[in-house]
Amino acid sequence: MSMNAASSSNNTVISVTNLAKSFGAAKAVQDVSFEVHAGEIFGLLGPNGAGKTTTIRMILDIFKPDRGTISVLGGPMREDKKARIGYLPEERGLYKDLTVEQCVTYLAELKGVARADIKTRAARFFEQFDLTEHRRKKVNELSKGMQQKVQIISTLIHKPALVIIDEPFSGLDPVNTRLVQDLLLEQRAQGTTIVMSTHLMYQVEEMCDRLVLIDHGKTVLYGGVDEIRRSHADRAVRVVAKGELPAIPGVIETSRKGNERTLALPHGMESQHVLEQLVAAGVPIEQFELALPTMDDIFVKVVAGGK
Amino acid sequence: MRKTLIVMRHEFVTLITKPSFWIALIGLPVFMAVIMGITIVSSTAATASAIAARQNRSDQQGYVDHSGIIRALPEGANLRAFPDEATARAALEAGEISGYFVVASNYIESGAVQYVSREFNPMDSPTDGFEQTLNYNLLGGDAALLSALNTPVAVRRAVATAPADAKGGANGAPFPIMPMVVSVMFSVVLITAAGYLMQSVTTEKENRVIEVLMSSLTPTQMLAGKVLGLGLIGLAQMALWLLSGLAALRFIPAGASLGVVDGGTIVVALVFFVLGYFIYASLMAGLGALMPGTREAGQYTFFIILPLFIPLYFNTAISLEPDGPLAVVLSLIPFSAPVAMVMRMTVTDVPAWQIILALVLLAVAVVVVITLAARVFRAQSLLRGTKPSLREVALALK
């Protein structure tokens, strides 16, 4: 799936075209193309070893690609752009011997934030993340979840225009997962572009606007989340209704959980026709919708199908 | 440049706020002072007791004179003549004498004298009295001339080298201790400063903070900041130890030779130190970048710092023959020059051309080593979590 670079617009924050990178004989990335638009949460998905991290490292200019072009924040990566990008890698790390404050300060300074600003911004984040009383503790005295929060603060403290975040929810309990989720949505509302790599498909459904799925170093799925789910929808509807449903010729009930049923439609039959039949039969319908596959289903189907 | 300075300050502040750093900084000179104190006290005591023992000994020393030089004994000489070595040995074994000298028949040409004793005591100096006897006879039995001969120091040195096979340490000029002090101090500071640098790299790898850093600055900025920050600490450490060392020298008994240490020597020594630091720091940074952690890197540290120990190993040779071929070669080879040249400079006037040549060679080596280290200090090495194969090391150096 290649993409024409001409389709890039001012709205594009990242544009990756036919990217390839090998390490010796191992082809980490073979042909990856996608665009990330301003102000969206973009899912960078793929099974382990698919080439996601290598792609991210090439976007950040940590690795040079063997082939392909990358445009970040309106052009090739430059030194000064690093201050406008926040990166939380999959392999989390902080200075274990430093205090939370020292650690956040150093990483923020390297992103070009003035010391005075760091102090006020850090104080606000510590408050928001319940870390105020822990700010003078050494990082290795903190729980894994707390360390994770310190890392997220370090990723956002310089107010980046683009955030690239690998597995943002790993190691977090449900309360903190919600906290981080809200924080990312808040960042998006403020206009920040977010690239998120995650294995939690329900988070993708909930948060991402668009996504790319990479497998074996190649783009295998790319587009808007809803659009992808629709394009992978089997011909089926989901109906929630009390009582029994009338038999509709050609329609088969494939599953039932209480009052919720999934009905498979024969080829050529529109969902509208099923709804009309049910209304005509006087069924008290509570919910009626196209049965979209979950991102989980699509992920498994596409990745397993590629093997 | 700004990021390099931030890294530099971070490395500097992080290290000096560590208690372990202060323990090493203060502990090592204290430890060395204690060791030196013990050595000085015990050697002074040993010398005193050896002298006392000799004075108290009623037994004589013997001599076998094949040259026929000794015709009379000076006043106070407790010596017994033997016609041949067999009888002298028999007297030694019988305990009649504590040892005997054998003057070679060609003594005038060769100056060869052998001393045979029952046991070897490095602190004992049995040859002084016999030298006086030889001189007395060479001077035709004139006691006044002998006393005049003993007065100028330079002449005495020439005589001290005469008994080539004579054993015992304190027969010549006092042994210079400054080269030893300098070489230990230089090696320790270079090794610790370069070691801190390696640890700083491997800790960032182990803490996995390196990838975040790489998204903020280039490996070169990171390397430069670390080298400068920890180099400053090395210099400060050097200055502190130098000052405390100079203060300690006041307590060393007169008679121990301190060698030549003037302002010019210190300035040139610092230049050698700084260049030496760049070499060893770059090597250690490269090692740190290649290895996945402190433990793995530590296994190879020895091979990198080995050249620093070579001058230390040849300390005696360099101290006694600072202008000999070994000393000159070691002070020109860039890896040993920072220590060897400074050792020489404390005991001899090193010709200017040798200092300049050593500095030029060192500067060239610095450029080469930094270039290689910067090649290794790249994302792919820094982000690798496993020990590299030889092929991967070769690739990294390309």
Image (tube, helix red, strand yellow):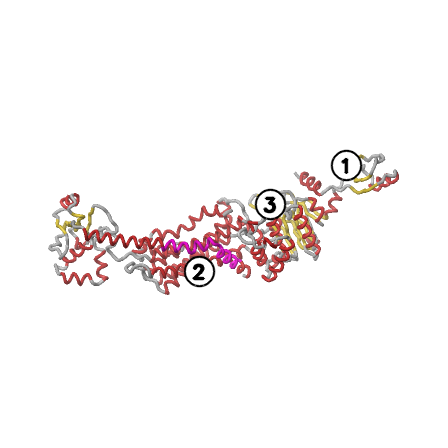
Q: Nearer the viewer, residue B136 or B287?
A: B136
Between the C-alphas of marks 3 and 2, the distance is 46 Å
Relative to residue A192, is residue A251 drawn left or right?
right
Q: Reply above or below: A260 against A227.
A: above
The secondary structure type at the circle numbered 1 is strand
Asked if residue B10 is among those painted magenta in the image, a careful observer would answer: yes
Q: Nearer the viewer, residue A37 or B116?
A: B116
Prevalent SS, magenta region? helix
Q: Is residue A248 visible?
A: no
Q: Are marks 2 and 1 on the same chain?
A: no
Q: Earlier in the sequence, mark 1 or mark 3?
A: 3
The circle drawn on residue B262 is none
Q: Which residue is mark 2?
A: B236
The secondary structure type at the circle numbered 3 is strand
- Amino acid on which disc 3 is placed: Ala
Give the chain of mark 1.
Answer: A
Q: Residue at x 48, y 51 (%)?
A: B199
Q: Are marks 1 and 3 on the same chain?
A: yes
Between the C-alphas of marks 1 and 3, the distance is 43 Å
Relative to residue A266, is residue B198 drawn left or right?
left
Q: Which residue is mark 1?
A: A257
Q: Reply above or below: A236 against B307.
A: above
Query: Callout 2: few (<14), some (14-19), or many (20+) C-alpha neighbours within 10 Å?
Result: few
- Amino acid on which disc 1 is placed: Lys
Give the chain of mark 2.
Answer: B
Q: Is residue B62 visible?
A: yes
Q: Disc 1 vs disc 3: which is toward the camera?
A: 1
